[in-house]
């Protein structure tokens, strides 16, 4: 242990409960502690082991029986703030129906085409958004099918909608 007085003078401060800072004293001596030369390798090894031990994360695996995982998945229509847990203030309820972030699964192409034909029998023009909601199919999958079956209206009163190509329309119209 080495003791020296050759260092920058320092003072000790404290905070009171009223928020006042007061000087408690001055530091007069500096003490440095070094391991003996013969124990230097052992001390270095001890420090490395300590560092490795505290860098390893302790994880526990627990098996949950009779659980369908409902608590693991976010409920549709509710979003939570990432910074803090769910509270009454930061829960946002979305309108009923599917959100835009919900994954949709592709159906059989033939069945989807049949349902589209039935939709176009009821109504001649459909927007992509309405068809996605009605058929519950992924948007890109629906676009690929519509590209084959329909004409997209860029202009006019039905702008932004799809209508069946003339060869697919019923002759009764």
Image (tube, rainbow, N blue to C red):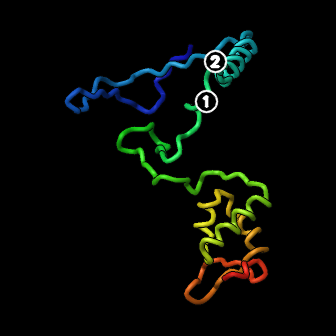
Residue 141, can we see it? no
Asked if 11 appears above or below 84 in the picture, the reply is above
Q: Residues within 10 Å of mark 1 (few under 14, many from 20)?
A: few
User: Closer to the camera, 39 or 138?
Assistant: 138
Q: In the image, residue 88 lies at what x, y percent?
A: 36, 40
What residue is drawn where x is 70% and y is 14%?
Answer: 46
| Quadrant of residue 57 within the rendered picture | top right
Query: Gap in Å between the C-alphas at discs 2 and 1?
Result: 10 Å
Kindly identify which residue carries mark 2. Answer: 65
Q: In the image, residue 58 lies at what x, y percent?
A: 65, 20
| Quadrant of residue 126 within the rendered picture | bottom right
Kindly identify which residue carries mark 1. Answer: 69
User: Closer to the camera, 87 or 163?
Assistant: 163
User: Closer to the camera, 77 or 11?
Assistant: 77
What residue is drawn where x is 79% and y is 60%?
Answer: 109
Asked if 136 appears above or below 169 in the picture, the reply is above
Q: In the image, residue 49 lies at what x, y percent?
A: 71, 17
Q: In the image, residue 132 lies at what x, y percent?
A: 63, 62
Dot 2: element? loop
What residue is drawn where x is 46% and y is 52%?
Answer: 94
State the count of labels.
2
What residue is drawn where x is 66% and y is 82%?
Answer: 173
Asked if 79 appears above or below 138 in the picture, the reply is above
Residue 14, can we see it? yes
């Amino acid at each position: 242990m080495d003791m020296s007085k050759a260092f920058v003078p320092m003072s000790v401060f404290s905070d009171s409960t009223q928020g006042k800072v007061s000087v408690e004293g001055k530091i007069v001596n500096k003490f440095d502690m070094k391991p003996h030369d013969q124990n230097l390798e052992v001390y270095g090894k001890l420090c490395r082991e300590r560092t490795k031990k505290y860098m390893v994360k302790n994880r526990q695996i627990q098996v949950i029986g009779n659980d369908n995982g409902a608590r693991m998945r976010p409920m549709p229509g509710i979003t939570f703030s990432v910074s803090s847990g769910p509270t009454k203030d930061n829960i946002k309820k979305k309108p009923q129906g599917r959100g835009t972030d919900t994954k949709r699964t592709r159906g059989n192409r033939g069945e989807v085409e049949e349902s589209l034909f039935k939709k176009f029998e009821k109504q001649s023009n459909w927007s992509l958004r309405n068809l996605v909601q009605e058929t519950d199919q992924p948007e890109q999958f629906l676009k690929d099918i519509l590209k084959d079956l329909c004409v997209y209206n860029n202009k006019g009163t039905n702008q932004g909608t799809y209508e069946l190509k003339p060869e697919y329309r019923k002759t009764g119209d």
